[in-house]
Amino acid sequence: MVPKPPYVGQRFDSFEDAKEFYLTYAKFHGFAVNSEYHRKIKETNEYSRCEMRCYKARRNKKGKGVAHVVPERKRGIIVKTECPVRCKLNVDGARWVVTEYFDEHNHKLIKKFDLVKFLTAHRGFTPLEKKFIKLLHDCNVGPSRMVQLLSLIHSKNGTLSRMPYIPADVTNLKAKYRRESRWHIIKKAEETLGPFFADRPDLHEAFELCVDHSLTVEEFERSWMAMIETYKVQDNETLASLWQKRMYWVLAYFMHCFFPFLQTTQRSEGFNAVLKRYVSPGNSLLQFAKQYTALQQKILGSELQQEANTAPNQPKLLTYLSMERQMSKTYTNKIFNK
């Protein structure tokens, strides 16, 4: 069924319902929308007016949107066209009503459906997927395996292009869970250790040196044991609890992890090394075929994601040479920026 556009007078039970309705329409027709909130009600501290605009609305900040020469290439930018497409809603009693709607874009829409879902507004995890990723994180499953499992949920063949997000989103969510876990452990411990350390400044200094300056697990554990022995705090329950949970909050335990980017098929990696992630000598021919197909789908999905990143973004240029401008239109942003 083709999603219908909103219309003036249409009512929704909440702004979230209206947003989901409009996002579905936008995704089908090849664009994304951004939300803006206005007019906060003092009594309830809630907004009474909201507006959804095309992702190319307004204009780029000074120096953006045009391919000026820059010292180095950075991430591409979405070129704003001051697109007038918008949907405004006001609170009317307990519901939200559409008060203004305009639907004529001044730019080309993305025709390929598999590319539209990679626009930021359409990317995201369902609450159930977030719980699943949290469970995998707690089981110490790496980002690459997480992506493989999630792709199987969205597609029987494990096609990455079926997922409404990119592998980097999975990596970032996993990193978020790890940071939050560490933050909660430390915050809870500080409530108890604050007064305890206030009376023992030397112990506090030793604690900080042990935690913040240990570069390896062995160095941390050796320093921790020495601290406990030196200051005779074997019976402190909070320190004992921190020791039991050390692998979740001490930086030395995950210094080998690099969260900003997902490790995939790098130039330094041979194909055999990549293949070993998917198949093993004990696999049957049928299992080998299935896993090899999954690897193919991963590579095709990665190519599709690069195409999606290139479609709405304009790379920055280093020179005024016409050849460079031509290459920026020929290659994907990732290849061009190399």
Image: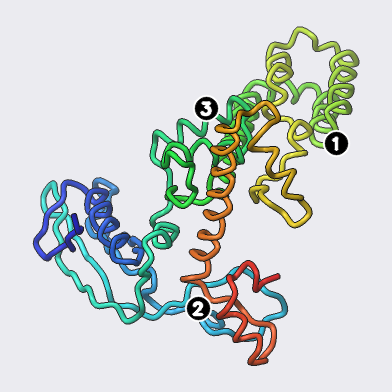
Q: Which of the image's four quarters has the N terminus?
A: bottom left
Q: Is residue 223 above or below residue 277?
A: above
Q: Where residue 90 sits in the image (x, y, percent)? A: 18, 59
Nearest to N terminus: mark 2 or mark 1: 2
Please give the label number shown on residue 61. Answer: 2
Please give the label number shown on residue 135. Answer: 3
Circle 1 or circle 3, nearest the eye: 3
Which residue is tagged 1?
215
Q: Secondary structure at mark 2?
A: loop
Q: How many marks?
A: 3
Nearest to N terminus: mark 2 or mark 3: 2
Q: Where residue 311 sits in the image (x, y, percent)? A: 48, 71
Outermost residue toward the top in this view: 235
Residue at coordinates 87% horizontally, 26% vertically from top-left? Answer: 218
Q: Nearer the viewer, residue 186 or 116?
A: 116
Residue at coordinates 29% horizontally, 77% vertically from top-left? Answer: 105
Q: Residues within 10 Å of mark 1 (few under 14, many from 20)?
A: some
Q: Where residue 296 sits in the image (x, y, percent)? A: 57, 49
Residue at coordinates 23% horizontally, 49% vertically from top-left? Answer: 17
Q: Mark 1 belongs to which amino acid? A: Leu
Q: Secondary structure at mark 3?
A: helix
Q: Mark 3 belongs to which amino acid? A: Leu
Q: Which of the image's four quarters has the C terminus?
A: bottom right
The residues bearing labels 2 and 1 have C-alpha atoms spaced at a distance of 42 Å
